[in-house]
Image: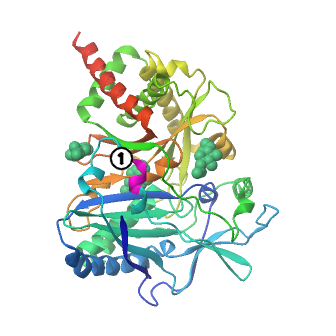
Amino acid sequence: MLTVLENCRVSPPPSTVGDKSLPLTFFDAIWLLFFPISQVFFYELPHPKSYFLETIVPKLKHSLSITLQHFFPFAGNLIVIPNPNRCFNGKKPEIRHVEGDSVALTFAEYELDFNELTGNHTRECHKFYPLIPLLGQPSKVYNYVTIPLFSLQVTLFPNKGIAIGLTNHHRLCDASTRFNFLKAWTSIAKHGTDELFLASGSLPFYERVIEYPESLDEIYFNQPGIETIDEGYKIPHLVGGTDKARATLVLTQAHINRLKKWLSTQSPTLEYVSSFSVACAYVWSCIAKARARTGEQKGENDNDGDDDLERFIFPVDWRSRIHPPLPPTYFGNCLGPCITTLTKRSLLAGNKGFQTAAELVGKALSETLKTKDALLKDADTWLERAYEPVLMIGVSGTPKMKVYDIDFGWGKPKKHETPSIDYNGSISVNASKDSAGDIEIGISLPTKQMDAFISISRSELESTFYDQDE
Ligand SMILES: *[C@@H]1O[C@H](CO)[C@@H](O)[C@H](O)[C@H]1NC(C)=O
Ligand SMILES: *[C@@H]1O[C@H](CO)[C@@H](O)[C@H](O)[C@H]1NC(C)=O
Ligand SMILES: CC(=O)N[C@H]1CO[C@H](CO)[C@@H](O)[C@@H]1O
């Protein structure tokens, strides 16, 4: 159903970047073995194929090239000197750009129903996979391995719309840098030049100024499995044949206010309540109830770990919190995890599930945000805790990034999805399209659990309303 129209490669304009390299910090190294991140932006655009080929394709190529001039690591490669002894011996992996490096960009046409894909209702996950570009495979050059970090695909739904799919290794950057890249690309595409982007003062900040103990490098550049990064390294990609479905839950400001009000009567001493914490707690408890109702107590990440433990994990952007603070344009990764652990799983699926989740998430967030100067104090255990074999739900994204502002000149996206949450029982949280106070949550679950989730989530929202009316 997918027809490839063109495979091309886009470089920064000749001689604008040259040879450059960017060292990785331990914040980047954390993600060395993580699965790639994929996002898709859908735009309504009722044009025929001829318009797409003659107008949109050249405009996107041109603006991408100029954007890469300012965001050269997106066109570069990760350079690794493999070492079977699991030790980079001071030769840490880095991102390198050499003149002529480029990003793989595919133009394609897809025959599925645009309106069906861009709804909020339950949709089969595998239908999105053809819209996601794959990352290039590693290759060996001399004694080192180069691994492409980013790729793009623009897919036409004739007379309906287009989808822009992006895939990047997390070791390239986090959501904040990716968002800045997209803001730059869209500004350049809209105006045909980078003047406004340059005037906005949002050029990436490439200095590696984060201060941290060297022992963290030793831990993260030597993490278990790191020896598999060589020319045979298999980059994970999403494959169909699963019975997973995705849906988008929209919690409006009014929903969130009611949930907050309900909490304030049930748990008046709660230390920390925000729209984000309430939304996460709400979804976490509804997923637990859905699992209980369908009799699937085990999650997909559940190995042989403690059956009664359940963990909720979300990234916190440290840029403004670290000492000394980094500019918001700092390029790369600067995320620390905020982790909360529930020791009795049945609590979450019970009557007080939402309240329990809100207490746990609120406590974890307030403790993490309070630490300030001691942010890195437990950084040596982040990965260990994130990879422990217990049931875990992870959050990607944050409502702070206004995904629906990503406008190439065709208006707001009709829809935004994060298909990479399918890898691992995560949910995605983004600002919503309609109003700054609303939150959109992308959810990916086995179909049976999804059906249960939808009906539970509806009735839970209603019951918090009734409680208040009484
Ligand atoms: C999905 O939810 C968003 C709110 O974030 C809304 O704007 C959009 O119209 C909804 N889509 C459909 C098909 O109902
Ligand atoms: C999913 O998470 C588990 C641990 O929670 C990890 O072992 C596994 O590698 C992850 N899957 C992918 C594709 O990274
Ligand atoms: C544009 C943007 O950054 N959007 C974020 C929305 O949430 C996803 C995760 O669900 C992030 O990966 C995105 O970065």
Q: Is residue 413 left or right of residue 453?
A: left
Q: Give percent across and percent down for residue 124.
A: 39, 47
- SS majority, magenta: helix
Residue 467 found in image quarter: top left
Q: Give percent across and percent down for residue 74.
A: 48, 71
Mark 1 Cα-neighbour bin, 10 Å: few <14, some 14–19, many ≥20: many
Tell which of 227 and 93 is nearer to you: 227
Kindly state the secondary structure of the residue where label 1 is placed.
strand
Looking at the rendering, the stretch of residues picked out in magenta corresponds to 124-128
Tell which of 459 and 65 is nearer to you: 459
Q: Give percent across and percent down for residue 445.
A: 45, 39
Q: Is residue 33 above or below residue 292?
A: below
Read off the residue under disc 1.
Answer: 430
Residue at the image position 69 percent from the left and 33 percent from the top: 304
Q: Is mark 1 within 8 Å of ligand 3?
A: yes
Q: Amino acid at mark 1?
A: Asn
Q: Is residue 287 left or right of residue 145?
A: left
The residue most toward the right is 85
Give the colour scheme of this rendering.
rainbow
Q: Give percent across and percent down for residue 254.
A: 23, 31
Q: Is residue 239 left or right of residue 268?
A: right
The residue most toward the left is 46
